[in-house]
Image (cartoon, rainbow, N blue to C red):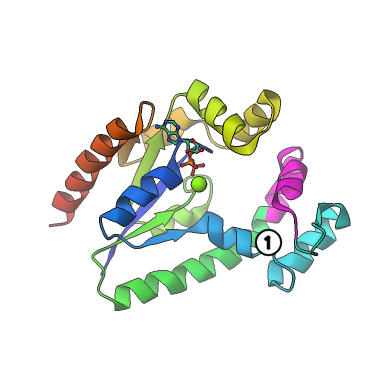
Amino acid sequence: MATIIGLTGGIATGKSTVSKMFEEQGVPVIDTDLIAKKQLQKGKPAYKEILALCGEDILAPNGDINRNKLAKTIFSDKTIRQKVNAIVHPKVKKIVKTEIKHFEDLDEPFVLLVVPLLFETDFYKLVDISVLVYARKKDQVERLIARENIDEAYAKQKIKAQLPLSKKREMADYVIDNSKNIMETRKSFQRVFKKIQHSVE
Ligand SMILES: Nc1ncnc2c1ncn2[C@@H]1O[C@H](COP(=O)(O)OP(=O)(O)O)[C@@H](O)[C@H]1O
Ligand SMILES: [Mg+2]
């Protein structure tokens, strides 16, 4: 059986950055964000349901759901956010389970499952070990603004929609510190990955 490592953090704290470090060590990565993104394409089962809920204003010119427009809608309305999550999460979970099975069939010792809302949803049930990518709030806001080209108020609104990072930090089995430069993060990653490897021996 593969050990399933759940990688979480706050928005823009560095999950994707750290997931690449696991990948470099040969650990297969399942990214729930990418899977969720695909659900927004025209013809996917979630597409119609989300459209019925949010209206055609969220569409891109090619007919797919525009992720930024959907985000604007769901981050300003908690009820809609919960409803969209209720549509998307079960579909993502089903795909995740299939992918985990695939890597288990290949006898992979570890699988990394990247889940932004690991502790907010029941995705935590799918993982054996949880790892949190930490960054200070100030850096998180700055990185989010730079990455998504949004203003500070909207960045803070997005961060607020998740459990506080301090809380997630208490819940996680391991913490990788991404509050400094990438070199330091790599060291923190190496320490944590070694501990995880030892813990399953
Ligand atoms: N240690 C770091 N120092 C500076 N910028 C960083 C650092 N780690 C990540 N970033 C940048 O911050 C942004 C968010 O990181 P990312 O890995 O995409 O976060 P997440 O996947 O958690 O949303 C990206 O633009 C990334 O390049
Ligand atoms: Mg990411």
User: In the rendered structure, which amino acid carries the disc numbered 1?
Assistant: Ile
Location of the C terminus by quadrant is bottom left
Total number of numbered discs in the rendering = 1
Q: Is residue 45 left or right of residue 21?
A: right
Whether the magenta-drawn stretch holds residue 78 is answered as yes
SS label for mark 1: helix
x, y percentage for residue 113? 41, 57
Toward the top, the furthest residue is 138
Q: In the image, what residue occupies the spot 55% across and 26% down?
A: 142
Most common secondary structure along the magenta stretch: helix
Instruction: Locate residue 186: give its quadrant.
Output: top left
Q: Which residues are magenta?
A: 65-84
Q: Is residue 139 above or below residue 199?
A: above
x, y percentage for residue 161? 63, 36
Instruction: Determine which residue is flagged by label 1.
Output: 87
Q: Is residue 47 left or right of residue 55?
A: left
Whether the magenta-drawn stretch holds residue 149 is answered as no
Q: Is residue 27 above or below residue 142?
A: below
Instruction: Locate residue 56: give its quadrant.
Output: bottom right
Q: Is residue 48 left or right of residue 94?
A: right
Q: In the image, what residue occupies the spot 14% across and 50% down?
A: 198
x, y percentage for residue 175? 32, 36
Q: In the image, what residue occupies the spot 63% across and 38% down?
A: 148
**Any part of residue 29 in sight:** yes
Label 1 crowd bin: few (<14), some (14–19), many (20+), radius 10 Å? some
Toward the right, the furthest residue is 56
Q: Is residue 20 above or below residue 40?
A: above
